[in-house]
Structures are given as C-alpha cells and as structure tokens.
Amino acid sequence: MHFITKSQIKLPKRRKDSHKGDNGLVLVVGGSKDFVGAVALAGLAALRSGTDLVKIIAPEKVAWAINAYSPDLVTMKLKGDYFKSSHFNIIKNLMDKFDVLLIGNGIGLGNDTKKFCKKTVKSIKKLKVIDADAVKSISMDDAENSIITPHSKELEYFLYNSHINKSSIKNINNEKNIIKKSQFIKKATQEFLDKNNIILLKGRIDVIISKDKIFYNKTGNAGMTKGGTGDVLAGLCAGFLAQSKDLLQSAINAAYFNGLVGDILMKKKKGFTYLASDMVGEIKRIRFNNQRLSQI
C-alpha cells in the first residue's frame, strides 16, 4: 500500500498580479433548520484553502446564523426551512458566476430535498463536490466532473441508489482489508469513475479512487470521528478544486491536509478534545505557498 506523502501535494499557484476571482469562486448549497453548522464549516474551510470567495445559499434562518458567525461568508437567503425542487433554477442561474458547486452539507433528507439534490447534481455540468446527504440522494448516473466524499454508510446508500448488486455491496461492507475493499469499490463504480468522477472514501485510512488509480491517506486520528470534520474536508476539496480545476489532485490535497490538521490539534490539545471548528482555525497554521508545504 502506498500512502500519500508530502511530495505528492501540489498546491495551486497564485499569480502575484491576480485579482479577486482569479483564484476560484465556490458556491455552497446546503443547510437546513436541523443542521446549521455544517455548511458554515465547509464554507470557511474552502476559504482557508486559498480560494477567493465563497457564497453560501441556505434557508434564511441558516443563512442569518452564518452571517452572525462569520463576516467572511457571503450568503443568499431562501424562504423556508429546507431546500425544495423549486429552488433549482436559482442555483442553475447562479452557477454561471462560480467555478465549483459544493452541495450536501447539512441539507437533510426530506423527499423534496432529495429530488432537489438529484436534479441539481444531474443538471449542473460544472465541477462539483458532493457530500453528506447529497451523496445519499444520487446514483452513478447522475454525476459527472465531481468529487464525492462519502463515509462508508453514505457510500452504501449511493451504491443501492445505483442498483449495484446486493452481494457486491455486502462484499464491500464486510471487507476489512482496505486494499481489497478499495478494489471492490473501484470495480463496482468504474462506470461512474469513467465520467470524470473521484470517490474520496473517508475512514481510518482515506481512500481516493479515480478511473485508473487508487491512493491511500493515513494522516488523521480517532478524534476526527467528531461531527463536522467531514464538512471541513468537503470544503477543502471545493476550495482546492476552484483554484486548480484538478479533481484528483484536489481530493489528494484535501484528504492529506484535513488529516494533518487533526494530527496537529491532537498534539496541541494533548488528546481528542478538539472540534471541527478548531480545525477550520488551525488550517491557517499550514503555509500554502505555491509548491511549498510547511507548518508554521
């Protein structure tokens, strides 16, 4: 097994004469009255990655809470407590101005919300990061030009939605050897991977699967089982992707940095007391300087 090393991290380059927007614009779609914090964590992580601007579209109460939490996140406020199919045209029209769509953080699983997620993912052809309940709402036929970031249960939903043979899903769920497990996943999802998609499976060892390669990431620790750490990962994916337009490299960078920040915090806090919000703040301790990577 070959783990991602520092030498495989390639950071987006930023021109000295660049202007606002030259380094990526991310549109984040998520949040519900049940889950407010997830979309804020994702948006802030995307900003910390170096992208120029993040706009969050969320139900109005969620968006107002985000505005109170951080002045750095721009929000658009939608009527109601959840996303509905009728909100699709708003997203479609806005995406002309953005490089990457991040969808799913805290969005919920109501029937109409699931329909909204499916329609949005299928219709938006631009680069996407699909996380959380949005992964549970789609099938392999729906997405292209995407990074999906499931944990094992979300991956199971995705495979069932895609009508993958139940015995194949059982083999994936039961396999303890991470190399064999990743090979099973690749075989079952090859059609999806061939449509310019990446699977970033979160776990004790993260697995990044492209159409012809598999990478493993071992940064991170058991403290990252806390809620919100996956939202930080998704935000990092979206932020790096908006800058580089490289799906695979963005997934590699995000997995490595997300775990690295968790490892730094475990040492700093002397245990597992750190939170996902601590991780967002700690990203600034990593120096992103073109191709150089170091801890301040």
Image (cartoon, grey):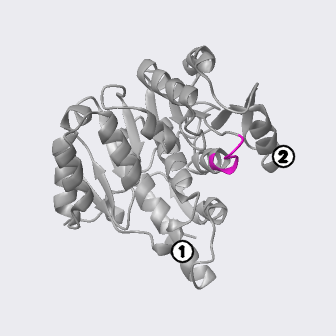
Can the viewer see residue 10?
Answer: no
Q: Position of residue 277 (x, y in %)?
A: 66, 61
Foreground residue among 207 and 55: 207
Q: Position of residue 146 (x, y in %)?
A: 38, 34
Question: Is 24 above or below relative to 2?
Answer: above
Considering the image in quadrants, where does the C terminus appear? bottom right
Residues at circles 2 and 1 in contact by the CB criterion of under 8 Å: no
Element carrying mark 2: helix
- Residue 287 located within the stretch drawn in magenta: no
Instruction: Name which residue lies at 62% across and 38% down.
Output: 52
Instruction: Name which residue lies at 62% across and 61% down.
Output: 284
Q: Position of residue 153 (x, y in %)?
A: 39, 52
Going by the image, does 184 lie left or right of 158? Answer: left
Q: Which residues are magenta?
A: 33-38
Going by the image, does 204 lie left or right of 269? Answer: left
Which quadrant of the structure image shows residue 108?
top right
Instruction: Name which residue lies at 57% across and 83% down.
Output: 271
Can the viewer see residue 54?
Answer: yes
Q: Residue at label 1?
A: 264
Looking at the rendered structure, the kind of residue marked 2 is Ala
Pick out the residue farthest to the bottom.
270
Pick out the residue farthest to the right.
68
Q: Residue at label 2?
A: 68
Foreground residue among 279 and 35: 35
Question: Is 196 above or below relative to 133?
Answer: above
Labels 2 and 1: the sequence-earlier one? 2
Residue mark closest to the camera, 2 vs 1: 2
The tag on residue 286 is none
Q: Position of residue 172 (x, y in %)?
A: 23, 54
Considering the image in quadrants, where does the N terminus appear? bottom left
Question: Is 287 above or below relative to 93?
Answer: below
Looking at the rendered structure, the kind of residue marked 1 is Ile
